[in-house]
Image (cartoon, helix red, strand yellow):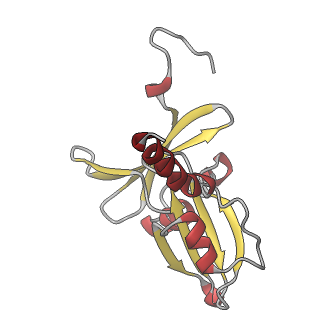
Amino acid sequence: MNRSFILAVSALIALVPGCASFDGRGLVPGKSTEAEVEALMGVPAQQLSLPGGDTALYFSRLPEGRAVYLVTVGPDGVMRSIEQRLVRKNLARIAAGVSTHEDVSALFGPPGRTGYLPLQEREWWEYKYFDYEQRRVIWVQFSSDGIVREVLDMLDWNYERPGRIRRL
C-alpha cells in the first residue's frame, strides 16, 4: 500500500475516539467513573467542589463550539449526572443586579471569550449556543464589583446570509 494512504488512515483512526466523546455518549450515571469520564471527554475546562462532597466537571466546546457539558461526580468517584448547560432555560437563572461571576461560572462554566468595555467600565463574558436550529450568543456584563448588570441573548449574525432579513 501507499505510505501516505497508511498515514492518512492512521491519523483518521486516532481522531475517531475524540469525536465520539463529544457529548459523553456511552457514559452511564451511577456506573461510569471519573476516570472513564475524563478518558472519554478529555480534561475538564473547570472543576468546582459542590456541597456534600460532589465535584462538578465542566467540559467546554467553546469558543467556537456551542456546548458546555457539566458532569457531576460523587465523593466515591462515580458519575451522578451529565447535562448540557448552554440552553435557553438556564438564562432565566441569571438575575441582573443579583447574580455574580461565581454564579455564572457555576451555571455555564468558563466563558468562550472575555473582554472589557472601558466606557461602561464593564467586563463581558461570551457564550455561544444552539437554540433549536438557531446559532445564538449570550453576553453577560459585570460591573467592577463582579455583579451581573446585563445579559444579552442574540442571534449569532456571523452565520446569517448577507442581505437576508429575518423576521423573529
Quadrant location, the C terminus:
top right
In the picture as drawn, the residue positioned furthest to the left comes out as 118
Q: Where is residue 104 drawn, in percent x and y? A: 50, 62
The reply, left or right, for residue 89 in relation to residue 12 is: right
Task: Say left or right for 59 vs 118.
Answer: right
Residue found at x 78% / y 79%: 30
Residue in the image at 56% along x and 51% along y: 67
Q: Tell me residue 70's x, y (percent).
A: 61, 65
Q: Residue at x 68, y 50 (%)?
A: 89
Q: Residue furthest top?
A: 163
Q: Is residue 77 above or below residue 81?
A: below
Give the residue at the far front of this rendering: 1
From this view, report whether residue 124 is shown above or below residue 159.
below
Image position, residue 73 (x, y; %):
64, 80
The number of callouts visible is 0
Q: Nearer the viewer, residue 90 or 94?
A: 90
User: Is 125 on the left-hand or right-hand side of 137?
Assistant: left
Is residue 81 shown above or below 17?
A: below
Question: x and y percent of residue 52 in the render?
Answer: 65, 89
Q: Is residue 130 above or below residue 41?
A: above
